Amino acid sequence: MPDRRHPYLLAAAGTPFGRLEGSSALDLMAQAANAAIARAGIARADIDGVLCGYATTYPHLMLATLLGEKLGLDPRYAHGIQMGGATGAAMVMLAGELLRGGVCRRVLVVAGENRLTGQARDTSIQTLAQVGEPDTEVPNGASVPAYYALLASAYMACTGTRREDLAEFAVLMRRNAAMHPRAHLREPIDVRQVLEARPIATPLHLLDCCPISDGAVALVLSTDDGPVRLAGAGQAHRHQHLSALRDVLDTGAARAAQRAMAQAGVTRGQIDYLAIYDSFTITLAMLLEELGHAPRGGAAARLRHGDYDPDGVLPLNTHGGLLSFGHSGVAGGLSHVAEAWEQLAGVAGQRQIGRRRRALVHADGGVLSAHVSLVLEAEAA
Ligand SMILES: CC(=O)CC(=O)SCCNC(=O)CCNC(=O)[C@H](O)C(C)(C)COP(=O)(O)OP(=O)(O)OC[C@H]1O[C@@H](n2cnc3c(N)ncnc32)[C@H](O)[C@@H]1OP(=O)(O)O
């Protein structure tokens, strides 16, 4: 008998990521939601919870209610949620709590944006600046890449990480995205191209940054048996963005992961798939090292050894991550959960890696400020 204390991920689905002219954020969310409900094989009337990530291109106060109406649902619980890049993982955690607590039996989790085509270029970049202090930083126009560049400089000085090391992560993410038919950026790149791309905010160059994409992702969680269980979830909120610079070696990521693994009753050594937030190459290197999946300054060495390859000991972001699959607001982080689900459920098609048992999903919001970790477990085949 399956363990009834754990919620299951019944299905995940999404739209392509990239330039999707003519679709509103709400249209994209509805497309992803309909695909996930169909894939879960349940009736629309069976959905009794809706969790919906905010959309900067559709700033509606009643987004979850509006989406439920558009989809023809009749939820007993609906909630719009905002936690930057960690929103997707936070919604999955909350869905788990609603299921464990008996509030709902089948929860739809959805996020989507037309962030590339639905806003002027400068508005998109300025919107992202709003993780800063509203009175001082936002009007001065500091961008999210600029914040992460400060983190990168501090971290590189502290650990000896070089630009060449970070570039390897951009190359791996692009190689993985080439295998995904719905990814935004699929052209192969090499380390030299990453190093020689135009500077955005030193030391980060264009290919060290995730793109701005359109796209949506949805999941259905339930107390019904499914192929993948949500075995654990944890959060940590240590500081608001720039205060991370005070201690780049302890952003709170490890604490969130420890809480998730403790709930799941597993140790780091039992994780065999990684889905790690990668808004920038530095984000990925820092998180891998803080989470203990590489020694400090040593993530690139593990990568060069092949450990993070799809056929390595610890496959990483096999859909191409935010850096290449794409980043469409909250849907970007939710795409990591969707990919982990596909891999654990064994339905990833041509990207399917060998059978994996347990994934750690980790997302951060703001500038490594809010952290959410999830442990997903495949039901034994
Ligand atoms: C905030 C949180 O809570 C946590 C987070 O998620 S942090 C991450 C949030 N997201 C971001 O900060 C987005 C980061 N990226 C950017 O701001 C922008 O992509 C950028 C500033 C790096 C580049 O923007 P830009 O200079 O305006 O480029 P733009 O003029 O739009 O595009 C020019 C070309 O480069 C491509 N391009 C743009 N960004 C790219 C990227 N990151 N990688 C590869 N190619 C890119 C475009 O597709 C375009 O190609 P074509 O000419 O073939 O169409």
Image (tube, grey):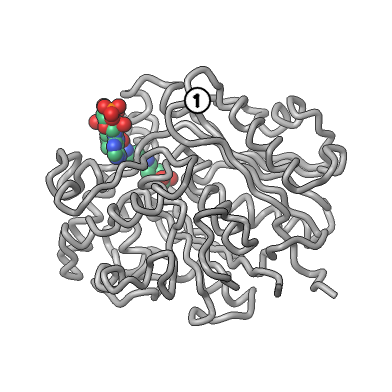
Is residue 242 or residue 198 the one in the foreground?
A: 198
Relative to 373, residue 125 above or below: above
The location of residue 86, given as percent across then percent down, is 50, 51
Work out whether residue 195 or residue 284 is closer to the camera in this orientation and state it.
195
Answer left or right for 7 relative to 235.
right
Question: Where 69 falls versus 231 (above or below)?
Answer: above
Ligand 1, by image quadrant, is: top left
Looking at the picture, does residue 191 appear above or below residue 121?
below
Q: Residue at x 54, y 48 (%)?
A: 334
Q: Is residue 144 visible?
A: no
Instruction: Using the rendered image of the protein, determine whether residue 110 is visible from the camera's viewpoint.
Output: yes
On the image, the x and y values in percent for residue 372 come to 52, 59
Q: Which residue occupies 25% across, 59% down? A: 168
**Closer to the camera, 326 or 244?**
326
Identify whether 236 is placed above or below 199.
below
- Asked where in the image residue 276 lies, by quadrant, the reply is bottom left
Location of residue 223 in the rendering, given as x and y in whole percent from the top left corner: 81, 59
What residue is disc 1 on?
Answer: 57
